[in-house]
Image: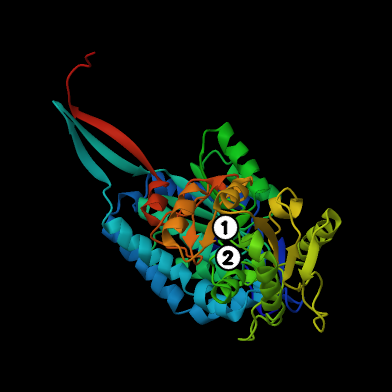
Amino acid sequence: MAHQYDRILIGGRLTDPSTDRVAQVVSPSTEEVIGHVPLASTADIDAAVAAARQAFDAGPWPRWSVQQRAAALRDLADRLDTRAAELAGLAMAETGCPRGFAEGYFAIAPSNYLRFYAELAEGYVFEEVRVNGPTRTLVVREPVGVVVAIPAWNGPLPLTTQKIAAALMAGCTVIVKVPVQDPLACHVFAEAVAESAVPEGVISVFAADAVESEYVVAHPGVDKVSFTGSTAVGSRIAEACGRDIRRVTLELGGKSAAIVLDDADIDAVVPALVGCGVAFMQGEICTAQTRILLPRSRYAEFTDALARHMSSLPIGDPADPATVIGPMITEAHRARVEEYIALGRKEGATVACGGGRPAGLATGWYLEPTLFTDVTNDMRIAQEEIFGPVVVAIPHDGPDHAVELANDSPYGLSGTVWTQDEEAALRIARRVRTGTFSINSYTLDINAPFGGSKKSGIGRENGHEGLDDYLEPKAIALSGAPLTD
């Protein structure tokens, strides 16, 4: 096997695991075993929590200056940059993401997150004195404590650094539980941590099965859990954290609506819609624009153009620079997406393009980009997250109806509007209940808050709001007067 890792990172040290259990990593494009990593046991998790607890309660990290912590993160970022090509290769091999996405996101986002929060925290106000008449109060923002970070399998290393960069700059210590489907790049990260200026105890990294994952989430030594993944799993994590009033950030599923108004330029909009829908990591991404709301008067025109464009997307080897659509992450996940395609047909929707496995690709867990037309918003394919290269086209009767359809969803993660009328676009953006929204594009800004409403999650990542979520405000009265009516 090309990528074998025999140790796990416990408190910044690469350590032999307590058992010989391993997770085999299978390439979604070749179906071959390409590596393995150790699986953490409950004893390993206890050791990781103890190290994090000691480092937080008695170690130097929370007591270092912000500048010292920032220097350590920049050192770690530099080490990741030297391995960027390796990280891109692992992303293609273990997740199936196309080369452009691997090189443009998986390889560079980790160090970008670390540097961004190092800089942001250096200008952040951690302490301030508030004056109210004779009362003077010192307000301090203190680190929440030991954090468990759980990234999703569709971007495990970028999502890991998105979480821990903010947590570390807040002064927290962190335990990262990585997914078993694609943990290889995260183990490269663990090696970089072990070599970096981050002190002992501060970071642990390991893969774990479901039982052990639940164990670390409910561990009494943990102060906060930050999770990215499905709404179903997020609900269980929230329940576990709620029993102990443990802090939690949840970035969960989505079924985002792209609202197209009747003045939209079809030649410009269709490629962009496809780019932020099925061509966005094969649709295996929570923010994919998978409900396309089209003006009824132009419905046939737009769906015909969408079908033509989607049918032209190159499918195949993720390492081929021409590839746009790579394989699904696992065989089981492809089967789940295929069940939704069968369900859509059963519900009465029409497959305008795709709907099957591509010819000539017998090896690998590939699916054709699929467009459903004749869809109503109450169908399950319009309400449930499919997490694959499947989009539905729904007609609307004007802006008010489009907003109504967009909000008629259990999710509220992202959304877009496509029009030449910027004032109308902003009015719509303000009315759609989502955590993020874009006009004539789909854009995420590391300096702006990211997260969802409704069943799409709790809390925010990115921006100063991401740092806020790892801090607890404390009020210290310096002087004052008795309360009066």
Image location (x, y in percent) of residue 100 = 56, 80
Instruction: Give SS at disc 2.
Output: loop
In the rendered structure, the answer to whether residue 129 lies left or right of residue 472 reads left
* Any part of residue 120 in sight: yes
In the rendered structure, the answer to whether residue 252 lies left or right of residue 59 reads right
Question: Badge 2: how crowded within 10 Å, few (<14), some, or many (20+)?
Answer: many
Q: Mark 1 points at which residue?
A: 151
Single out the residue that lies furthest toward the right: 346
Q: Which of 9 and 334 is in front in this view?
A: 334
Instruction: Give SS at disc 1.
Output: loop
Above-or-below relation of 354 to 20: below
Q: Please name the amino acid that badge 2 sits on.
A: Gly
Image location (x, y in percent) of residue 43 = 62, 49
Residue 279 tag number: none
Q: In which quarter of the image is the C terminus?
A: top left
Q: Quadrant of the N terminus?
A: bottom right
* Any part of residue 197 in sight: no
Instruction: Report the coloring of the rendering.
Output: rainbow
Image location (x, y in percent) of residue 129 = 19, 38
How far apart marks 1 and 2 lie (CA) works out to: 7 Å
Q: Please name the amino acid that badge 1 sits on.
A: Pro
Image location (x, y in percent) of residue 272 = 56, 72
Q: Is the residue under label 2 in contact with that under label 1 (CB below 8 Å)?
A: yes
Single out the residue that lies furthest toward the top: 485
Q: Mark 2 points at which residue?
A: 155
Single out the residue that lies furthest toward the left: 134
Q: Nearer the viewer, residue 366 or 171?
A: 366
Above-or-below relation of 198 to 384: below
In the rendered structure, the answer to whether residue 375 lies left or right of residue 411 reads right
Query: Which residue is located at x 48 percent, y 60 percent?
Result: 438
Query: Which residue is located at x 60 percent, y 76 percent?
Result: 90
